[in-house]
Amino acid sequence: MTLYETVMKLVGPIVPIGDTNEDANRLENLKELLKLVDQLITDLEEMSELKCKHEYSIKKAGQIVSRFLRDKIKIAEDW
């Protein structure tokens, strides 16, 4: 089982199906998933600041994260 599959199993279904009671549960699942994504993005934003470090391995990790945030998630840098 992949990490994605594990997280989604823990969160539960998120796609509404048109049943009021079930969709209420799925909405709560979606809110929990969004909280997790928000925290992960916050962690990545903090890590992207490492691209300014002098140590190669630290700088490389920061560059990879910065590129991901810019290209995949469309989060632009303020500096």
Image: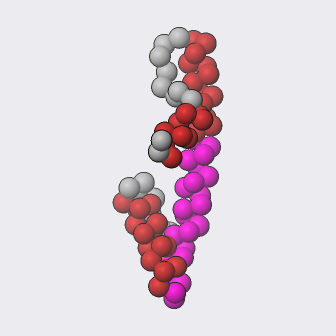
Q: Indicate whether 74 appears above or below 1.
A: below
Instruction: Let me know if residue 6 appears in the view.
Output: yes
Q: Position of residue 31 (x, y in %)?
A: 61, 35
Protein image colouring: secondary structure
Q: Which quadrant of the structure image shows residue 68?
A: bottom left
Residue at x-position 55% and y-position 41%: 7
Image point (48%, 13%), residue name: 18
Say which residue appears at 42% left-offset and 69% top-offset. 64
Q: Main secondary structure of the magenta part?
A: helix
Q: Residue at x 59, y 58 (%)?
A: 42
Q: Is residue 30 visible?
A: no
Q: Residue furthest front?
A: 1
> Residue 70 at what x, y percent from top left?
41, 62
56 part of magenta stretch: no
Q: Position of residue 73 (x, y in %)?
A: 42, 54
Image position, residue 25 (x, y; %)? 62, 22
Query: Which stretch is magenta?
Result: 34-55
Q: In the current view of this chain or complex, which residue is farthest to the bottom?
A: 54
Q: How many marks?
A: 0
The answer to which quarter of the image holds residue 72 is bottom left
**Nearer to us in this view, 32 or 2:** 2
Is residue 48 covered in magenta?
Answer: yes
Q: Residue furthest left?
A: 71
Eyeballing the image, is 70 above or below 56? above
